[in-house]
Image (spheres, rainbow, N blue to C red):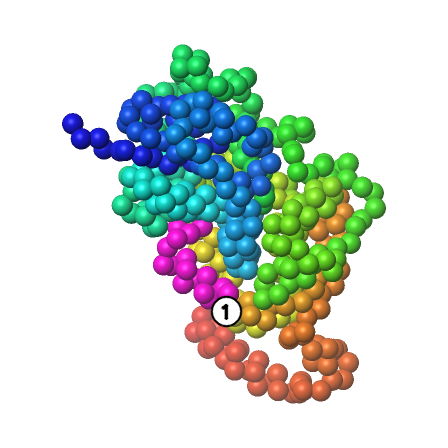
Protein backbone atom coordinates (compact mmCIF):
# COMPACT_ATOMS: atom_id res chain seq x y z
CA UNK A 1 0.00 0.00 0.00
CA UNK A 2 1.37 3.40 -1.00
CA UNK A 3 2.30 5.73 1.86
CA UNK A 4 0.03 8.79 2.06
CA UNK A 5 2.67 10.89 3.83
CA UNK A 6 6.44 10.63 3.57
CA UNK A 7 7.48 13.79 5.42
CA UNK A 8 5.53 16.15 7.68
CA UNK A 9 6.49 19.47 9.28
CA UNK A 10 5.02 19.83 12.76
CA UNK A 11 4.47 23.13 14.59
CA UNK A 12 6.22 22.02 17.78
CA UNK A 13 6.44 23.60 21.24
CA UNK A 14 8.00 20.84 23.31
CA UNK A 15 4.96 20.58 25.55
CA UNK A 16 2.90 17.50 26.25
CA UNK A 17 0.52 17.86 23.28
CA UNK A 18 3.05 18.36 20.50
CA UNK A 19 5.48 15.85 21.99
CA UNK A 20 2.80 13.18 21.88
CA UNK A 21 1.78 14.34 18.39
CA UNK A 22 5.36 13.96 17.17
CA UNK A 23 5.56 10.32 18.24
CA UNK A 24 1.99 9.62 17.09
CA UNK A 25 2.81 10.95 13.60
CA UNK A 26 5.85 8.67 13.39
CA UNK A 27 3.76 5.64 14.32
CA UNK A 28 0.61 6.33 12.36
CA UNK A 29 2.14 7.58 9.11
CA UNK A 30 5.57 5.88 9.34
CA UNK A 31 7.06 9.09 7.97
CA UNK A 32 9.83 11.59 8.59
CA UNK A 33 8.87 14.35 11.01
CA UNK A 34 10.46 17.79 10.99
CA UNK A 35 9.87 19.68 14.26
CA UNK A 36 9.57 23.46 13.85
CA UNK A 37 9.62 25.96 16.73
CA UNK A 38 8.72 29.62 16.14
CA UNK A 39 10.18 32.16 18.55
CA UNK A 40 7.61 34.97 18.65
CA UNK A 41 8.53 36.26 22.07
CA UNK A 42 6.87 33.63 24.21
CA UNK A 43 9.90 33.69 26.54
CA UNK A 44 9.21 30.13 27.56
CA UNK A 45 12.12 27.77 28.00
CA UNK A 46 13.40 27.28 24.45
CA UNK A 47 16.75 25.75 25.30
CA UNK A 48 16.95 22.00 25.04
CA UNK A 49 14.02 21.71 22.63
CA UNK A 50 16.12 20.27 19.81
CA UNK A 51 17.39 17.46 22.04
CA UNK A 52 13.87 16.83 23.34
CA UNK A 53 12.38 16.74 19.83
CA UNK A 54 14.99 14.34 18.52
CA UNK A 55 14.66 12.13 21.59
CA UNK A 56 10.94 11.93 20.84
CA UNK A 57 11.57 10.91 17.24
CA UNK A 58 12.08 14.06 15.17
CA UNK A 59 14.27 13.55 12.12
CA UNK A 60 15.11 17.24 11.81
CA UNK A 61 14.64 20.37 13.90
CA UNK A 62 14.19 24.07 13.15
CA UNK A 63 13.97 26.98 15.55
CA UNK A 64 13.35 30.32 13.85
CA UNK A 65 13.33 33.79 15.43
CA UNK A 66 10.19 35.45 14.03
CA UNK A 67 9.85 38.29 16.55
CA UNK A 68 10.67 41.14 14.19
CA UNK A 69 8.58 39.72 11.35
CA UNK A 70 5.67 39.12 13.72
CA UNK A 71 5.58 42.70 14.96
CA UNK A 72 6.52 44.43 11.71
CA UNK A 73 4.37 42.45 9.25
CA UNK A 74 1.43 41.36 11.39
CA UNK A 75 1.03 43.42 14.57
CA UNK A 76 1.79 46.86 13.10
CA UNK A 77 -0.50 46.47 10.05
CA UNK A 78 -3.36 45.54 12.38
CA UNK A 79 -2.60 48.46 14.68
CA UNK A 80 -2.51 50.84 11.70
CA UNK A 81 -6.15 49.83 11.25
CA UNK A 82 -6.93 50.14 15.00
CA UNK A 83 -8.11 46.54 14.84
CA UNK A 84 -9.97 45.29 17.89
CA UNK A 85 -12.32 42.31 18.11
CA UNK A 86 -15.62 42.70 19.97
CA UNK A 87 -15.20 44.13 23.48
CA UNK A 88 -11.52 45.05 23.31
CA UNK A 89 -9.46 42.01 22.26
CA UNK A 90 -6.31 43.25 20.48
CA UNK A 91 -5.90 39.98 18.56
CA UNK A 92 -2.63 38.78 20.10
CA UNK A 93 -3.13 35.07 19.36
CA UNK A 94 -5.02 35.72 16.12
CA UNK A 95 -2.04 37.61 14.69
CA UNK A 96 0.53 35.07 15.89
CA UNK A 97 -0.90 32.01 14.16
CA UNK A 98 -0.49 33.15 10.53
CA UNK A 99 3.16 34.13 11.02
CA UNK A 100 3.89 30.70 12.51
CA UNK A 101 1.97 28.86 9.78
CA UNK A 102 3.64 30.93 7.05
CA UNK A 103 7.12 29.92 8.16
CA UNK A 104 5.97 26.33 8.66
CA UNK A 105 4.81 26.22 5.03
CA UNK A 106 8.11 27.73 3.85
CA UNK A 107 10.02 25.01 5.70
CA UNK A 108 7.71 22.33 4.28
CA UNK A 109 8.44 23.54 0.74
CA UNK A 110 12.18 23.76 1.45
CA UNK A 111 12.16 20.24 2.91
CA UNK A 112 10.01 18.89 0.07
CA UNK A 113 7.50 17.68 2.67
CA UNK A 114 4.04 16.62 1.66
CA UNK A 115 2.19 17.45 4.90
CA UNK A 116 1.98 19.92 7.79
CA UNK A 117 0.57 19.28 11.27
CA UNK A 118 -0.48 21.39 14.25
CA UNK A 119 -1.51 20.76 17.85
CA UNK A 120 -4.64 22.93 17.97
CA UNK A 121 -7.73 21.31 19.46
CA UNK A 122 -10.95 20.70 17.57
CA UNK A 123 -12.93 23.27 19.57
CA UNK A 124 -10.90 26.45 19.24
CA UNK A 125 -10.09 29.12 16.70
CA UNK A 126 -6.44 28.17 16.18
CA UNK A 127 -7.18 25.10 14.06
CA UNK A 128 -8.96 27.41 11.60
CA UNK A 129 -6.16 30.00 11.59
CA UNK A 130 -3.44 27.43 10.96
CA UNK A 131 -5.30 25.55 8.28
CA UNK A 132 -6.61 28.55 6.34
CA UNK A 133 -3.02 29.81 6.14
CA UNK A 134 -1.82 26.43 4.90
CA UNK A 135 -4.55 26.39 2.26
CA UNK A 136 -3.86 29.93 1.13
CA UNK A 137 -0.08 29.55 0.84
CA UNK A 138 0.43 25.89 -0.09
CA UNK A 139 -2.84 24.20 -1.08
CA UNK A 140 -0.97 21.08 -2.23
CA UNK A 141 0.10 20.17 1.31
CA UNK A 142 -1.84 17.57 3.26
CA UNK A 143 -3.08 18.91 6.62
CA UNK A 144 -2.91 16.66 9.67
CA UNK A 145 -4.90 17.73 12.75
CA UNK A 146 -4.30 14.98 15.33
CA UNK A 147 -6.86 16.26 17.84
CA UNK A 148 -9.53 15.57 15.20
CA UNK A 149 -8.12 12.16 14.27
CA UNK A 150 -6.81 10.29 17.28
CA UNK A 151 -8.74 8.57 20.06
CA UNK A 152 -7.17 10.41 23.00
CA UNK A 153 -9.83 12.22 25.02
CA UNK A 154 -7.72 14.59 27.08
CA UNK A 155 -4.58 15.30 29.07
CA UNK A 156 -4.77 12.11 31.14
CA UNK A 157 -4.70 9.98 27.99
CA UNK A 158 -1.74 11.95 26.66
CA UNK A 159 0.22 11.51 29.89
CA UNK A 160 -0.42 7.77 29.84
CA UNK A 161 0.74 7.54 26.23
CA UNK A 162 3.85 9.62 26.96
CA UNK A 163 4.77 7.38 29.91
CA UNK A 164 4.18 4.23 27.87
CA UNK A 165 6.34 5.47 25.01
CA UNK A 166 8.95 7.01 27.33
CA UNK A 167 8.48 10.41 25.75
CA UNK A 168 10.61 12.99 27.62
CA UNK A 169 7.95 15.39 28.91
CA UNK A 170 7.22 16.64 32.37
CA UNK A 171 3.74 15.37 33.13
CA UNK A 172 3.13 17.77 35.97
CA UNK A 173 -0.18 18.65 37.54
CA UNK A 174 -2.15 20.70 35.05
CA UNK A 175 -2.46 24.41 35.74
CA UNK A 176 -5.98 25.55 36.63
CA UNK A 177 -6.01 27.49 33.31
CA UNK A 178 -4.17 27.49 29.98
CA UNK A 179 -1.77 30.23 28.93
CA UNK A 180 -0.43 31.38 25.56
CA UNK A 181 2.27 34.03 25.30
CA UNK A 182 3.91 36.07 22.55
CA UNK A 183 5.45 39.51 22.20
CA UNK A 184 2.04 41.21 21.92
CA UNK A 185 0.19 39.59 24.82
CA UNK A 186 -0.51 36.72 27.17
CA UNK A 187 -3.91 35.03 27.00
CA UNK A 188 -5.46 32.92 29.74
CA UNK A 189 -8.50 30.66 29.31
CA UNK A 190 -10.03 27.38 30.38
CA UNK A 191 -10.06 25.68 33.76
CA UNK A 192 -11.17 27.92 36.61
CA UNK A 193 -11.72 30.78 34.14
CA UNK A 194 -14.55 28.90 32.43
CA UNK A 195 -16.92 30.22 35.10
CA UNK A 196 -17.46 33.85 34.01
CA UNK A 197 -18.46 34.79 37.59
CA UNK A 198 -15.09 33.75 39.05
CA UNK A 199 -12.42 36.46 39.17
CA UNK A 200 -8.95 35.59 37.80
CA UNK A 201 -6.52 34.64 40.58
CA UNK A 202 -4.28 37.54 41.56
CA UNK A 203 -1.09 35.55 41.06
CA UNK A 204 -2.00 34.53 37.49
CA UNK A 205 -0.77 37.65 35.72
CA UNK A 206 2.77 37.64 34.29
CA UNK A 207 3.23 40.91 32.38
CA UNK A 208 1.45 43.43 34.59
CA UNK A 209 1.37 44.32 38.27
CA UNK A 210 -1.99 44.88 39.88
CA UNK A 211 -3.02 48.52 39.31
CA UNK A 212 -3.47 48.84 43.09
CA UNK A 213 0.19 47.90 43.56
CA UNK A 214 1.52 50.04 40.72
CA UNK A 215 3.80 53.02 41.55
CA UNK A 216 2.16 56.01 43.23
CA UNK A 217 3.99 58.34 40.87
CA UNK A 218 2.89 58.51 37.22
CA UNK A 219 5.34 58.06 34.35
CA UNK A 220 5.30 59.99 31.09
CA UNK A 221 6.19 58.50 27.72
CA UNK A 222 6.35 59.98 24.22
CA UNK A 223 5.63 57.68 21.27
CA UNK A 224 6.69 58.76 17.77
CA UNK A 225 4.86 57.52 14.66
CA UNK A 226 5.65 57.56 10.95
CA UNK A 227 2.75 56.79 8.59
CA UNK A 228 0.89 55.01 11.37
CA UNK A 229 3.83 52.90 12.56
CA UNK A 230 5.48 53.51 15.95
CA UNK A 231 9.20 54.08 15.44
CA UNK A 232 10.52 55.58 18.69
CA UNK A 233 9.80 55.93 22.40
CA UNK A 234 11.09 58.94 24.35
CA UNK A 235 13.21 59.91 21.36
CA UNK A 236 14.94 56.53 21.09
CA UNK A 237 14.50 54.81 17.73
CA UNK A 238 13.79 51.10 18.15
CA UNK A 239 13.07 48.15 15.89
CA UNK A 240 9.44 46.94 15.90
CA UNK A 241 10.10 44.05 18.30
CA UNK A 242 12.34 46.15 20.55
CA UNK A 243 9.76 48.93 20.71
CA UNK A 244 6.89 46.62 21.65
CA UNK A 245 9.04 44.82 24.22
CA UNK A 246 10.02 48.15 25.80
CA UNK A 247 6.41 49.34 26.01
CA UNK A 248 5.43 45.99 27.53
CA UNK A 249 7.86 46.63 30.36
CA UNK A 250 6.88 50.21 31.16
CA UNK A 251 3.18 49.47 30.70
CA UNK A 252 3.45 46.34 32.80
CA UNK A 253 4.94 48.09 35.80
CA UNK A 254 1.98 50.50 35.80
CA UNK A 255 -0.63 47.73 35.51
CA UNK A 256 -1.79 48.72 32.02
CA UNK A 257 -3.47 46.39 29.53
CA UNK A 258 -5.55 43.87 31.49
CA UNK A 259 -8.79 42.69 29.89
CA UNK A 260 -11.42 40.13 30.92
CA UNK A 261 -14.05 39.40 28.25
CA UNK A 262 -16.39 36.71 26.95
CA UNK A 263 -15.93 36.54 23.18
CA UNK A 264 -17.57 34.69 20.31
CA UNK A 265 -15.28 32.09 18.78
CA UNK A 266 -15.47 31.50 15.05
CA UNK A 267 -16.63 27.91 15.65
CA UNK A 268 -19.75 29.19 17.41
CA UNK A 269 -18.79 28.84 21.08
CA UNK A 270 -18.70 31.67 23.60
CA UNK A 271 -15.38 31.67 25.43
CA UNK A 272 -14.04 33.67 28.35
CA UNK A 273 -10.57 35.08 27.84
CA UNK A 274 -8.34 37.10 30.14
CA UNK A 275 -5.58 39.07 28.44
CA UNK A 276 -2.53 41.15 29.27
CA UNK A 277 -1.50 43.51 26.46
CA UNK A 278 0.44 46.37 28.08
CA UNK A 279 2.51 47.60 25.13
CA UNK A 280 -0.30 47.11 22.64
CA UNK A 281 -2.72 49.08 24.81
CA UNK A 282 -0.29 52.01 24.98
CA UNK A 283 0.20 51.94 21.21
CA UNK A 284 -3.53 51.87 20.52
CA UNK A 285 -4.21 54.88 22.78
CA UNK A 286 -1.32 56.83 21.28
CA UNK A 287 -2.20 55.96 17.69
CA UNK A 288 -5.83 56.97 18.06
CA UNK A 289 -4.79 60.27 19.63
CA UNK A 290 -2.47 61.09 16.72
CA UNK A 291 -5.17 60.21 14.21
CA UNK A 292 -7.52 62.79 15.71
CA UNK A 293 -5.31 65.62 14.40
CA UNK A 294 -4.00 64.03 11.19
CA UNK A 295 -6.89 62.13 9.59
CA UNK A 296 -9.66 63.62 7.49
CA UNK A 297 -13.06 63.21 9.13
CA UNK A 298 -14.73 61.20 6.35
CA UNK A 299 -11.69 58.96 5.85
CA UNK A 300 -11.62 58.27 9.59
CA UNK A 301 -15.34 57.50 9.75
CA UNK A 302 -15.11 55.20 6.73
CA UNK A 303 -12.12 53.42 8.25
CA UNK A 304 -13.96 53.04 11.55
CA UNK A 305 -16.94 51.49 9.76
CA UNK A 306 -14.67 48.92 8.07
CA UNK A 307 -12.56 48.10 11.12
CA UNK A 308 -14.94 45.55 12.70
CA UNK A 309 -14.97 43.53 9.48
CA UNK A 310 -11.18 43.78 9.18
CA UNK A 311 -10.69 42.64 12.79
CA UNK A 312 -13.17 39.82 12.27
CA UNK A 313 -11.19 38.55 9.29
CA UNK A 314 -8.04 38.39 11.42
CA UNK A 315 -9.83 36.70 14.31
CA UNK A 316 -11.40 34.14 11.98
CA UNK A 317 -8.05 33.27 10.37
CA UNK A 318 -8.33 35.02 7.00
CA UNK A 319 -5.06 37.00 7.18
CA UNK A 320 -3.97 35.60 3.82
CA UNK A 321 -7.16 36.39 1.95
CA UNK A 322 -7.91 38.81 -0.91
CA UNK A 323 -10.47 40.70 1.18
CA UNK A 324 -8.05 41.30 4.07
CA UNK A 325 -5.36 42.47 1.67
CA UNK A 326 -7.82 44.81 -0.06
CA UNK A 327 -8.90 46.29 3.27
CA UNK A 328 -5.25 46.61 4.29
CA UNK A 329 -4.55 48.71 1.21
CA UNK A 330 -7.25 51.14 2.29
CA UNK A 331 -6.11 51.15 5.92
CA UNK A 332 -2.54 51.94 4.88
CA UNK A 333 -3.63 54.67 2.45
CA UNK A 334 -5.51 56.31 5.33
CA UNK A 335 -2.28 56.33 7.38
CA UNK A 336 -0.13 58.31 4.95
CA UNK A 337 -0.18 61.45 7.09
CA UNK A 338 -0.39 59.82 10.53
CA UNK A 339 3.07 61.04 11.53
CA UNK A 340 3.92 62.82 14.76
CA UNK A 341 4.28 62.42 18.51
CA UNK A 342 1.93 61.63 21.37
CA UNK A 343 2.69 62.31 25.04
CA UNK A 344 1.14 59.90 27.53
CA UNK A 345 0.74 59.50 31.28
CA UNK A 346 0.92 55.96 32.66
CA UNK A 347 -0.63 55.60 36.08
CA UNK A 348 -2.22 52.72 37.99
CA UNK A 349 -3.76 50.84 35.08
CA UNK A 350 -4.58 53.90 32.98
CA UNK A 351 -2.95 55.36 29.88
CA UNK A 352 -3.96 59.01 29.43
CA UNK A 353 -3.14 61.32 26.53
CA UNK A 354 -1.40 64.53 27.63
CA UNK A 355 -0.60 65.99 24.22
CA UNK A 356 -0.19 65.35 20.54
CA UNK A 357 1.61 67.14 17.68
CA UNK A 358 2.13 66.42 14.00
CA UNK A 359 3.80 68.04 10.99
CA UNK A 360 0.74 67.33 8.85
CA UNK A 361 -1.86 68.27 11.43
CA UNK A 362 -5.35 69.21 10.28
CA UNK A 363 -5.99 70.92 13.58
CA UNK A 364 -5.87 74.68 12.97
CA UNK A 365 -6.08 76.86 16.11
CA UNK A 366 -7.33 79.85 14.12
CA UNK A 367 -10.32 77.75 13.01
CA UNK A 368 -10.93 75.94 16.29
CA UNK A 369 -10.77 79.01 18.53
CA UNK A 370 -13.90 80.41 20.17
CA UNK A 371 -12.34 83.83 19.82
CA UNK A 372 -12.44 85.81 16.61
CA UNK A 373 -10.60 83.81 13.97
CA UNK A 374 -10.08 83.69 10.24
CA UNK A 375 -11.22 81.24 7.58
CA UNK A 376 -14.69 80.62 9.01
CA UNK A 377 -17.79 82.80 8.71
CA UNK A 378 -20.34 81.91 11.43
CA UNK A 379 -23.22 83.25 9.32
CA UNK A 380 -22.54 80.46 6.80
CA UNK A 381 -23.85 78.00 9.38
CA UNK A 382 -27.35 79.45 9.05
CA UNK A 383 -28.00 78.04 5.58
CA UNK A 384 -26.12 74.85 6.42
CA UNK A 385 -28.41 74.18 9.38
CA UNK A 386 -31.55 75.18 7.46
CA UNK A 387 -30.83 72.73 4.66
CA UNK A 388 -30.13 69.87 7.09
CA UNK A 389 -33.29 70.68 9.01
CA UNK A 390 -35.55 70.77 5.97
CA UNK A 391 -36.29 67.04 5.94
CA UNK A 392 -36.98 67.11 9.69
CA UNK A 393 -39.62 69.83 9.15
CA UNK A 394 -41.26 67.83 6.37
CA UNK A 395 -41.21 64.65 8.47
CA UNK A 396 -42.77 66.42 11.47
CA UNK A 397 -45.51 68.01 9.34
CA UNK A 398 -46.45 64.60 7.99
CA UNK A 399 -46.56 63.11 11.51
CA UNK A 400 -48.99 65.81 12.61
Extent of the magenta region? 314-332
* Residue in the foreground of this view, choosing between 294 and 143: 143
Q: Residue at left 63%, top 59%?
A: 230
Q: Residue at left 40%, top 63%?
A: 326
Where does the image place residue 18, in percent across and percent down from the top left?
43, 28
How many other residues sit within 10 Å of disc 1, few (<14), some (14-19) or many (≥20)? few
Q: Look at the image and tell me in which quarter the N terminus lies.
A: top left
Total count of labels? 1
Residue 105 visible at all: no
Where does the image place residue 98, in percent across and percent down from the top left?
44, 46
* Residue in the foreground of this view, choosing between 136 and 39: 39
Residue 319 visible at all: yes
Q: Residue lying farthest right?
A: 217
Quickly name the residue at label 1.
Answer: 333
Seen in the picture, residue 40 relative to 79 is either above or below; the reply is above
Check residue 331 for magenta coloring: yes
* Residue in the foreground of this view, choosing between 7 and 308: 7
Q: Main secondary structure of the magenta part?
A: helix
Where does the image place residue 192, in percent across and percent down from the top left?
55, 25
- Image-quadrant location for residue 177: top right
Q: Residue at left 57%, top 86%?
A: 383
Q: Residue at left 39%, top 43%?
A: 107
Position of 54 with respect to 248 (left or right) is: left
Where does the image place residue 221, in percent across and percent down from the top left?
75, 55
* Residue in the foreground of this view, choosing between 5 and 321: 5
Position of 134 with respect to 92 (left or right) is: left
User: In terms of secondary structure, where does tag 1 sit?
Assistant: helix
Seen in the picture, residue 138 relative to 226 is either above or below; the reply is above
Check residue 233 for magenta coloring: no
Q: Residue lying farthest left?
A: 1
Amino acid sequence: MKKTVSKVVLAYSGGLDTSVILRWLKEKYECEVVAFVADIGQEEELSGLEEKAKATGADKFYMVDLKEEFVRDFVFPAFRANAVYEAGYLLGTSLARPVIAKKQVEIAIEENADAVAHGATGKGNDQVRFELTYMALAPHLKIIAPWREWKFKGRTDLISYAQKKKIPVEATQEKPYSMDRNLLHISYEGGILEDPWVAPPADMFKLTVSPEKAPDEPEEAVVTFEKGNPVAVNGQTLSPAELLNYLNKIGGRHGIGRLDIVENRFVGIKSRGVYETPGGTILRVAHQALETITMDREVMHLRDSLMPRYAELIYYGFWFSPEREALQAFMDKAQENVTGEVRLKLYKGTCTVLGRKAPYSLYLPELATFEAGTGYTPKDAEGFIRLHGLRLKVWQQREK
